[in-house]
Amino acid sequence: MRHRVKKKHFSRTAEQRKALMRSLARSLILFEKIESSEAKLKALKPFVERLITLAKKGDLASRRRALALLPDKEAVRKLFTELAPRFEGRNGGYTRIVKLPNRKPGDSTELAIIEFVE
């Protein structure tokens, strides 16, 4: 039974889902805007917002926790030096998801864009 199980599985194992979220979060932090399926981006949003909240603290323990969640030094550096100061006066809601029209007929994947709020 699936009682109280809220996350999407995406037909992947736990390790594959973790790798997917890390990869999408890394791309979003480095490029500040990515396009993917709407379901993946909805699962990514809380993950990225937690990382930004960690970066806003700015201490060494937060940096180490961010490196544990996102093992890419360049992305963590950008997160702490560029993105965290940008959202200093904001209490959440750092990203937005914008839906795109469907691709071709016969493909029912709903595409979307996730980007940082200015």
Image: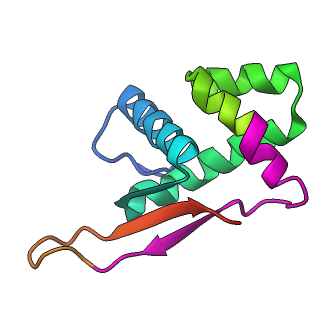
Decide if residue 110 is on the left or right side of residue 46.
left
- Against 83, residue 100 (above or below) is below
Task: Answer whether residue 6 is visible to the viewer in this image.
Answer: no
For the C terminus, the image quarter is bottom right
Q: Quadrant of residue 37?
A: bottom left
- Against 43, residue 98 (above or below) is below
Q: Position of residue 107 (x, y in %)?
A: 14, 70
Which residue is pictured at 34% across the width and 32% down the height?
A: 13
Foreground of the two, 83 or 51: 83
Which residue is pictured at 40% across the width and 60% down the height?
A: 39
Decide if residue 15 is on the left or right side of residue 54.
left
Task: Answer whether residue 10 is visible to the viewer in this image.
Answer: yes
Foreground of the two, 80 or 23: 80
Magenta residue check for 109: no
Q: Position of residue 49 (x, y in %)?
A: 68, 50
Which residue is pictured at 44% across the width and 36% down the height?
A: 23
Which residue is pictured at 49% across the width and 74% down the height?
A: 98
Q: Position of residue 43 (x, y in %)?
A: 50, 53
Decide if residue 51 is on the left or right side of residue 1.
right
Q: Position of residue 74 (x, y in %)?
A: 59, 26
Q: Which residues are magenta?
A: 81-101
